[in-house]
Amino acid sequence: MPIKSYLIFPHKGKKQELIDALGDQPCEIMPAKNRDLLVLVSDTKDEAEEETFLQKLSRMKSLDHFTLVAGFND
């Protein structure tokens, strides 16, 4: 079960829109209080589900870019 954390950068003014779009995804979202970014922790059942999640994430129009911070694969 991969558990990975990402820094997620929304387009300017699109932070809440991105949070709403991520609402039904296999992740926990922690918005920064002093920056326009999110910390996202994904918890998927396998690498295939993680890849599907990343593909959906990369297609979100409110997303500017994201970067992997840490990963753990059980």
Image: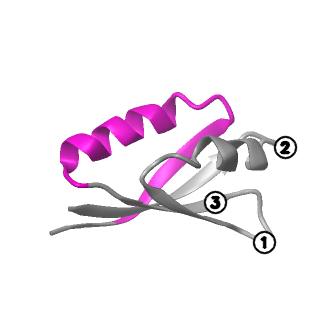
- Using the rendered view, name the quadrant where residue 41 is placed: bottom left
Badge 1 vs badge 3, beta-carbon distance below 8 Å: no
Instruction: Give the SS element for disc 1.
Output: loop
Q: Residue furthest right?
A: 13
Q: Which residue is mark 2?
A: 13
Instruction: Give the SS element for disc 2.
Output: loop
Segment colored magenta? 45-70
Give x and y (percent) for residue 25: 47, 47
Q: Amino acid at mark 2?
A: Gly
- Answer with mark 1 or mark 2, whichever residue precedes in sequence: 2
Q: Is residue 68 above or below residue 3?
A: above
Q: Residue at x 57, y 46 (%)?
A: 22
Q: Which residue is mark 3?
A: 38
- Residue 73 disc label: none
Query: Is residue 64 covered in magenta?
Result: yes
Give x and y (percent) for residue 11: 74, 39
Count every numbered label the image shows and give the total: 3
Q: Which residue is mark 1?
A: 33
- In which quadrant is the C terminus drawn? bottom left
CA gap between label 3 and label 2 equals 13 Å
- Answer with mark 3 or mark 2, whichever residue precedes in sequence: 2
Q: Amino acid at mark 1?
A: Lys
